[in-house]
Amino acid sequence: MKYTLNFNKLDNSKVSLVGGKNASLGEMFQQLSSKGINIPDGFATTAEAYRKFIKENDIEDKLKETLSAVDPGDQGSLQKTGKKCRDYIMNSNIPKEIEEDILDAFRNLKDREDAVSSVAVRSSATAEDLPDVSFAGQHESYMNITNQEDLLQAWKKCVASLFTDRAIKYREENGFDHMKVALAVGVQKMVRSDKASAGVAFTLDPESGFRNVILINGAWGLGENVVQGTVRTDEFYLYKKALKEDKKAILAKNTGTKRKTMVYTSGKEGEDSIKNVDTPEEKQKQLVLNDEELTMLGKWCLEIEEHYDKPMDIEWAKDGNSDKLYIVQARPETVHSAKKEKTSFKKYSIETNGDEEVILKGIGIGDKIASGKAKILDSPDDADKIQKGDVLVTEITNPDWDPIMKKASAIVTNSGGRTSHAAIVARELGAVAVVGAGNATEQIEDGQEITVSSAKGNEGFIYKGKLDWKEEEIDLKKTGNPDTEVMLILANPGTAFQNAMYPVDGVGLMRLEFVINGSIKIHPMALVNFDKIEDKEIKKEVEQITQGYSNKKEYFIDKLSMAVGTIAAAFYPKDVIVRMSDFKTNEYADLIGGKQFEPEEDNPMVGFRGASRYYHENYRDGFALECQAMKVVREEMGLTNVKLMIPFCRTVEEGKKVKETMAENGLERGKNELEIYVMTEIPSNVIEADAFAAEFDGFSIGSNDLTQLTLGIDRDSEIISDLFDEQNPAVKKTIASAIESARKNKRKIGLCGQAPSDFPEFARFLVKNKIDSISFNPDALAKGIENIVKAEKQ
């Protein structure tokens, strides 16, 4: 009998023979190598080899007897049992037939695969009667094995790892017969990612389950740092539709700190020959993959997902010797792909009063809020310190932590990214987590009451004390679907995928100011005129922020296009109406380098803002950058669902000037299905509605500014704030007139604002006047839908 099988003889029908990991590698090697996907060649030892090893060494009964006495709830009992079982394995001899098969397969691998100087040796467990069980993370792997003696020793260590303390506990808790689980071993060409980078990819967004993107995480060195969450990784999102159409597909590039790099040492191969070293500061700032590599990896992930016909969890590695990318593992994603379509949605939000103290921020996992006593644990051995409902705070987690994590109301880790062990387990448990929080174990006190929130999208917050929060439910079975279009007001791309799961008709207002202020941070004219920046300190700061961009204007275009592209991709093919920037001069001046390029005004609210800036020599070149970013989104990314909107357009003539300026920058109304809307927020927009309708494709009522200018109230003034009322008869007549004019001219019109969710009677007023759409902030969506449905029934 042959005890090894080469990858070209394996496929997914062989799971019970060689385990899920090896079967999947063989399947991909056979089926996907021809499509240009690099899968390192290798071979697997079979479950039968394991059984023969156990039988010929006459240790089956000894293992049974030892395991029958284990108490999985007693750490001491687990440790004693595990060590005894592993000693039985390590003190046994590999049968001659198995040893010869392994060494023959090793020599053949070196003959058929170029430059195999070393191999990775990985465990792949399988159960006789449950061939689909993966036992992920329970057993050991050994890397960079170069010679025959070390290969045989690594094989035996893999077999022994079937009896690690955590593997025994896992089988006990899940009801598996220890003796019916066998251990196959995969031996694969070693990808020298210690000299380059490695990471993980998901073919969906692991937070929301959104299916139209690929998430790629990576760090320098071996991929173990990514899986374990030892470092804050680089994070990339790619849009599947753009990948398929060979369009620009990268939606986000976030640089992680990557403070450690896992490398091989010069010690004995296979034995403690891996260590983490400090990553040089300059390299921490570099991304681990360039755009070309990201695109290729994204296309590979698409091919793998299409081959398996399900969302996948994929491990990749880059070889530092050859600069080639490889796929080293792929398994089905198990959390979101198993969920059914939802008709009920919960929205969580902190009930703020302005004095909440944020202790730390990190990567938010779980879209929820939880609170409890913080328990700082150094290792799983401290399990007795944590009670059900406490918040687990630790450096990193691995499978040994799983039983402890089940007790916790929330999980906080210093290290890790969106694909780390802590993040994955939190999703499986439906728990809230903040990972990569930096120094949480130092900043948070043991026993301190804290609140952990990931309800604001990708960013997670840890607050001091036990805060109150509200949970709103949108249940379409109860409320029904409104006829009036319901859209969202969005600014933060980090919430896009979660918000796209809500029952909405698109985005009625995407504000560019959030991205410019929060992500770009630099005044557009300071980027256009970088060489003319007068303040040396500001110039140095701009240089640091735009590191990697020799052309500073490209920094703005790249950042803005990815942010808008993320939201547009999340809602595609539904409309996403993007309002061009509408800072006031005092707000523009607060951007880095802004004071040099902004005038000082006594009343910025009605000054140099909106449309007036776009064609003016003081900002024309800055507006050109906004236009170029939108052109990238619509043409290079293929996201033609983006419509553009002009704010604070005082006259029809001004509207014409803006459109001419946009056309000069490649954004011509009607070309490539481009629609340009105008905000209705000045009385002139209503009075001259017919003329505006001839120049623009639609209207969006900005109720705040329209109320301000109809009633002559500065909405920033506290003294007369009690007079500010969107339901004032004069304001309502203005809004009704705007809707009537839009309908007469066959132009769509919507309203963006809080009033329809706060005041049911205002929703009734809008519905009665047959407005096309109403846009809400996400936290007001549930109430807004409820008010619209009631209004339509009435």
Image (cartoon, helix red, strand yellow):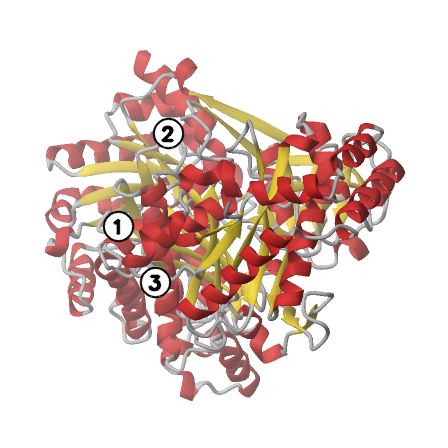
**Front-lying residue, 541 or 685:** 541
- Rendered image quadrant of residue 635: bottom left
Q: Who's the residue at 26% across and 50% down the image?
A: 642
Q: Is residue 327 left or right of residue 468?
A: left
Residue 121: x %, y % from top left: 59, 58
Q: Who's the residue at 48% across and 38% down the image?
A: 15
For label 3, the residue is: 296
The answer to whether any part of residue 618 appears in the image is: yes
Cα gap from disc 3 to disc 2, whole angstroms: 33 Å
Cα gap from disc 3 to disc 1, whole angstroms: 26 Å
The answer to whether any part of residue 567 appears in the image is: no
The numbered mark, 3 or 2, whose residue comes first in the sequence reads 3
**Front-lying residue, 47 or 716:** 47
* Amino acid type indicated by mark 1: Val
**487 shown above or below 533:** above
* Amino acid type indicated by mark 2: Pro
Residue 453: x %, y % from top left: 63, 41
The numbered mark, 2 or 1, whose residue comes first in the sequence reads 2
For label 2, the residue is: 503
Residue 310: x %, y % from top left: 38, 38
**Front-lying residue, 18 or 3:** 3
Q: Which disc number belongs to residue 642?
A: 1
Query: Which one is closest to the eye, mark 3 or mark 1?
Result: 3
Cα gap from disc 2 to disc 1, whole angstroms: 19 Å
Within 10 Å of the Cα at label 2, are there few (<14), some (14-19), or many (20+) other Cα atoms? Answer: many
